[in-house]
Image: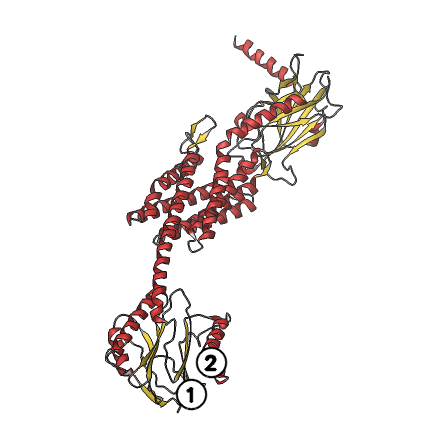
Amino acid sequence: MKKRRWLLALLILSFCGGLGAQTFEVKDDNLRVASLDGLWRFHPGDDPTWADPKFDDSKWALLRSDKDWSSQGYKDMSGLAWYRFQLIAPARLEHVSLSLPSISTCYEVYADGVLIGTYGKMPPNTAPYASEELHRAYGLPEGKRAGRRVAIALRVWHWPGWAMYYGGGPFVGGGLFGDSGEIEHRIKLERASQYWSRAEDLIDLILSGLISFGMMTLYLLRRKDPEYLWFSLSALIGAAAGWVQVSTMFEVRNIEIRDMVNGIADAAGSLASIAFYCYLLRPKRGWLLKLAFAAAVLDLINSTADSLSGYIFGVWFWNLIGWSCSLIFDVWVLSAVFAAAKKKSPDARLLVLPVTLNTGADLWSSLAQITYTAGWQHVSSGSYVLTQKPFPIEIGNVTGTIFLLAVMGILALRFARTRSQEERFASEVEGARSVQQYLIPAQLPRTPGFTLESEYMPAREVGGDFFQILPIASDGGLLVVVGDVAGKGLEAGMLATLIVGAVRTAVAFTGDASAILSLLNERLQGRGLVTCLALRVDGEGNATLVNAGHLPPYLNGAELPMEGALPLGAIPGVEFPVLRFHLGEGDSLVLMSDGIVEAQKADGELFGFERVGKMLRESATAGELAAAARDFGQEDDITVLSVARAAVLVTA
């Protein structure tokens, strides 16, 4: 009995060894195509004569055409190998094509020794190419159809970078040959079904693009908040990377370039997301943030270097680095959001759920991919389909969409909230502007015997400069107070308002300039620093000038020699230097703030004292001096006040 079994086995083997390439034929006259599923002759290596239709391949191995060669005895094999089979098409078919299933990685198709098609780049200039198209059609030449036997030879090159993950050669069935029109129709239906199966990815791309456009619009409306810009860039990068991936449905892509683009996009997206969360949540800049930033940079270097070097350490190492970097980034995002939510940040509290869902899905996917690649588990490689209807939807698509919509809503609410705050602040500023009339008189008072001129140019909506001109009826003179509050904006303006009120109150009791500055100094202790000049001129031109750290005035274009002093509010009980002089008829005294001399060009050149003195000696008015400093490059509030003593005409 055993001898008979051995004899039968030997007969079968000898019979199979005598067979040529497997033959496929359209036998039924009612059918226009036939399947290519079955056994194909296979041999590793490379020899141009293997494309010859007369080559005897009877000693080649027989492999199934719907499984890769790795699962059929050639595990982890890369490089070149050949498949051979034969076709017989009925004479009634005018145009004959064959539809080959997906084959890893690149290949050439020969019909009776004639090259009829190429997929990817073959040796010696190899480059790995891939597409999500399940089948590709190749038409037979005019003389290679219609009832004749045609020898088909496939020269296949399998990329070493994929050898340990995917076997070479065909890995799905469904190959056909026969009528070209029928094959083309079936491929169109297959591609339409494939596009529909990727509908969720296309929806994600469109949604990411629209959200990126919306966030960029908000940033252009409010450039002070860069979080809108960074989230827009993050969404745009994600959409671009997704498009590169989805485009393999209808384009053959270089795998190394595709992976490099996706890897760089992932790393750039992580960097943009880090910037987004830092501006939005203001997290602590601790070791975890530095580690997340370093991981994103490492991922960027890894994606670029490995792709350009042909994955010198292997695809598994590239994937491990990428997944590890993604893991670190997700952990930092979760910690930053929860820490900000604990501090009662309204934006962080709204982000907790969508960020937890999205990063949780990413963490699960990364861990599943790492453990699956390492061989620790064989259940999941990182993807999980929630439903197949109306098209396949994975959990990552759902959590990603929830995250994008949630962040867009949160940023829109933030934009509305900040706009409301700006409107409220604008209202407050408008109120401060109305107070400004007390700091800078809209109309100068009538002062017989004196000619007054003033010019005021604030650097912001509310300035910190102030001046007051108060006539003294008792002797026909006047009191002039000019000052500059340290700082800018609303706070400086409010302090200047306090000073003006104190000056007006003090004048009701005394016209002594020294006493007024001493009173102001006591009132300003602990509230800020203010430089100030107080000028008291009587009707005869006798002038008393008291200085509290302010710029000396110019008399007839020459700077008065005043002693330096501390500003108001610096030290209690300090005595301020006093200068007494006479203001004759026709004399002009110009008082100004430091915004004049500190006006600055883009290259750093200052307006300076020399330019001020020259203009005043050339009889420049207060308005001309202020305009010149503004045009030169205004940096601070500008105040110029001119007091000239005029002759009083006496009529008989």
Circle 2 crowding by C-alpha within 10 Å: few under 14, some 14–19, many from 20: many
Residue farthest toward the bottom in the current orientation of the protein: 652
Q: Is residue 113 left or right of residue 405?
A: right
Q: Is residue 140 left or right of residue 71?
A: right
Q: Which residue is mark 2?
A: 612
- Would residue 60 be seen by someone viewing this image from the given angle? no
Percent x, y of residue 407:
40, 43
At 56% across and 27% down in the image, what residue appears?
A: 192
Is 508 above or below relative to 350?
A: below
User: Residue 471 is drawn in which quadrant?
Assistant: bottom left
- The disc at residue 587 is 1
Name the mark nearer the viewer: 2 or 1. Answer: 1
**Kind of element beneath mark 1:** loop
Is 269 above or below relative to 380?
A: below
Quarter that holds the C terminus: bottom left
Marked residue nearer the N-terminal end (2 or 1): 1
Q: Is residue 74 left or right of residue 537?
A: right
The foreground one among 472 and 11 is: 472
The foreground one among 31 and 89 is: 31
Percent x, y of residue 464:
36, 70
Q: Is residue 522 left or right of residue 604?
A: left
Residue farthest toward the right in the current orientation of the protein: 143
**Kind of element beneath mark 2:** helix
Query: Label 2 amino acid?
Result: Val
User: Residue 560 is drawn in which quadrant?
Assistant: bottom left
Percent x, y of residue 618:
50, 84
Circle 1 crowding by C-alpha within 10 Å: few under 14, some 14–19, many from 20: some
- Would residue 26 be seen by someone viewing this image from the given angle? yes
